Amino acid sequence: MSEPEPSKVEEAEDDEKTQPASAEDDEQDEALVKLFADMGIKPKKEPQDVPKPAPLFRSFDIAGIADLIKGGKAKRIVCMCGAGISVSAGIPDFRTPGTGLYSQLDKYNLPAPESIFTLSYFRRHPEPFHQLARELFPGRYAPTPTHHFMRLLHSKGLLQRCFTQNIDSLEQLAGLPKDMVVAAHGNFDSAACIECEEEYPPEWVKAKIEGGEICRCSACEGLVKPSIVFFGEGLPERFFQRATADMPKCDLLLVMGTSLAVYPFAGLIGYVRGTCPRVLVNRECVGDDGRPGGFDFDASHRDVWLGGDCDSAVQQLAAELGWGSELGELVAAGKAACAAAAGDGNDDRAGAEQRADGTAGLCCLPISCSKAAD
């Protein structure tokens, strides 16, 4: 008997493939599904196309952000701030080669630059921090346009809260009420003994440090330091309380001048609702490293990155909102007040002026807290 021609075999196979499933086939499929279900194996669902969410900004630029605010869709704005908003005041960041604070600490002969803000090192050698602290106390520098922009948001009833990594207290100097600011890494507004936690007024600490004395507790002889969060210390409880309460209410998140490298602060961007528009104002694009809740600028949905200088960005945004003259007046008044406080009428530290010893000050501490919120 001769073999069937190849073309005939292929046609027969094609006929079998195109035959409709019989009732017997359906019963076999159902039996297999039941068998697998009894074994705890569920059939995979065919992937379905997920519709792309609609953009939350009319345009992904300053005009689009202004449109959101003018349209009344942003009434509970939360600001997250880092060292970048204070650099134009003359206060250096930490790691910029040549100008960052860490590059200015060689004279203290530290085992590592971070040691000066490490609790264990401070216990053994408090002198370097006390020397540096003379330059850290607030009052030497004027708030920047970015600080005054947040003051504008508050005065217009649009600011829910300002979360800051900075310890310079320039937010309050710009006119933000103390309760509107969450200093994640502490500041100089209070001081306490690191052993018995006896509290001391910051004026007392400042007088001691400027007099060249080591601050010691009168009750236990422990070291007294400003309430700045050092490595080895937990973040203030208020940070976690306000994050839990404020972030879910946020309807526009402004992240300004931070590398989002330090947790738990950086994790706050993921605490807002999935429908909350988010804006990053920073020279580098950060926060889009794939972490849960991180930015996704490519999606063109709810995240906007404004690359560049914080002050320039907020000035453009203020102009787009019709607040340009108000912001300008606040900035001018802030500079005048700072100059008057300095007593010489010409002490404009809103530029990048540095002090004679090369140390311009400090804006934020790169604290990594053991009490992580993420």
Image (tube, rainbow, N blue to C red):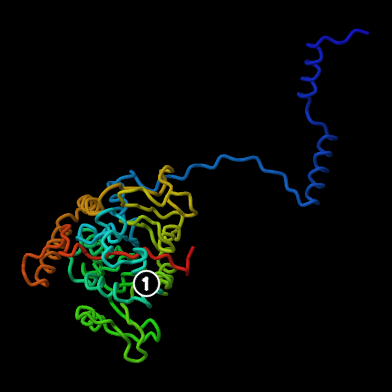
Would you call the spot at circle 1 few (<14 residues within 10 Å), some (14-19), or many (20 or more)? Answer: many
* Mark 1, residue position: 229
The reply, left or right, for residue 292 in relation to residue 329 is right
x, y percent for residue 329: 13, 61
Q: Residue at x 27, y 84 (%)?
A: 201
Q: Residue at x 36, y 55 (%)?
A: 259
Does residue 164 appear in this view?
Answer: no
x, y percent for residue 135: 22, 70
The reply, left or right, for residue 364 in relation to residue 294 is left
The reply, left or right, for residue 181 in relation to residue 23 is left
- Identify which residue, 319 or 371, lies in the foreground: 371
x, y percent for residue 65: 31, 50
Q: SS class of the residue under badge 1?
A: loop
Q: Quadrant of residue 26?
A: top right
- Identify which residue, 299 or 125, lies in the foreground: 125
Tell me if residue 321 comes above or below residue 154 in the rendering: above
Tell me if residue 210 comes above or below residue 167 in the rendering: below
x, y percent for residue 288: 43, 49
Query: As drawn, which residue projects farthest toward the top?
Result: 2
Q: Quadrant of residue 20?
A: top right
Does residue 34 appear in this view?
Answer: yes
- Identify which residue, 6 or 160, lies in the foreground: 6
Q: Residue at x 40, y 57 (%)?
A: 261
- Identify which residue, 16 or 221, lies in the foreground: 221
Query: As drawn, which residue projects farthest toward the front?
Result: 109
Give amino acid for label 1: Val
